[in-house]
Amino acid sequence: MGEHEIESVRRMVVFLLALGALRLAWAFTPSAPPLLAGAPVVGDSLLDATTAALDERTRRTRPLEAGERIDLNGAGEEELDRLPRVGPALARAIVAERERGGPFTGMEDLTRVRGIGAATAERLAPLLEIQGGPAPTAGSRPPVPPDPVLSLGGATPEDLQRLPGVGPALAARIVEVRARRGGFERVEDLLEVPGIGPVTLERLRGRVRVP
């Protein structure tokens, strides 16, 4: 986290505390007029929005733990933003290129992203993993073994990670969406999973079935 990011978080925290103090003072002021029933509470809306923004900023700036790797094919924009010297714009570009051109199969594929060259891909390689396996060097391309057609109804996260472009994070989201909606009715329902777009869906066709 850079000095500018730390200062932004500090200012947001100060603003949040000041807003809370102001609302508390207003509530205990005898002469303060009561709020009309059903009237929108601007302070509450602003507080909620500020809290949400602060939570997102905290997630984006949380440094990687020792040995932690980000799943290049399953991570969302917020997770990718945690990588050193990868800001929101570049994180968005990585996700957009993944959706446009399909999952990354090796570290060299990162150079498909505008703004990432060979040197940057090499620097990020030790912090990334692809298809559930670590990718410590640029140029490495983990083999994709031939998989039988997988049932989305009973597949475990480990089963799902055998699919092309599906790492631990994306597998967990597939299971979460499946549980929330009570199962998948058709393969196209995978589009409800964050991180799966039309390109990824087409790559999975023929490898998965319902149920």
Image (cartoon, grey):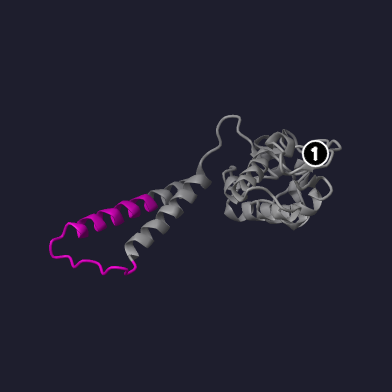
| Three-letter code for the amino acid on which mark 1 is drawn | Gly
Residue lying at the far right of the rendered structure: 146
Q: Percent from the top left, x then y, of residue 8? A: 43, 52
The residue range painted magenta reads: 11-40
- Residues 161 and 155: in front is 155
The residue carrying pointer 1 sits among few (fewer than 14), some (14 to 19) or many (20 or more) residues within 10 Å by Cα, namely: some
For residue 1, say whether it is visible.
no
Q: Percent from the top left, x then y, of residue 101? A: 78, 54
Would you say residue 140 sits in the magenta stretch?
A: no
Residue lying at the far left of the rendered structure: 30
Q: In which quarter of the image is residue 179?
A: top right
- SS for dot 1: loop
For residue 145, say whether it is visible.
yes
The residue depicted at 80 percent of the width and 38 percent of the height is 139
- Location of mark 1 (residue): 139
* Relative height, residue 48 to residue 180 (above, below): below
Would you say residue 37 sits in the magenta stretch?
A: yes
Left/right placement of residue 63 relative to residue 156 reads left
- Residues 3 and 77: in front is 77
Left/right placement of residue 82 relative to residue 157 reads left
Q: Percent from the top left, x then y, of residue 211? A: 75, 46
The residue depicted at 86 percent of the width and 37 percent of the height is 146
- Residues 147 and 16: in front is 147
- Residues 150 and 137: in front is 150
The residue depicted at 81 percent of the width and 38 percent of the height is 141
Left/right placement of residue 210 relative to residue 63 reads right
The residue depicted at 75 percent of the width and 34 percent of the height is 137
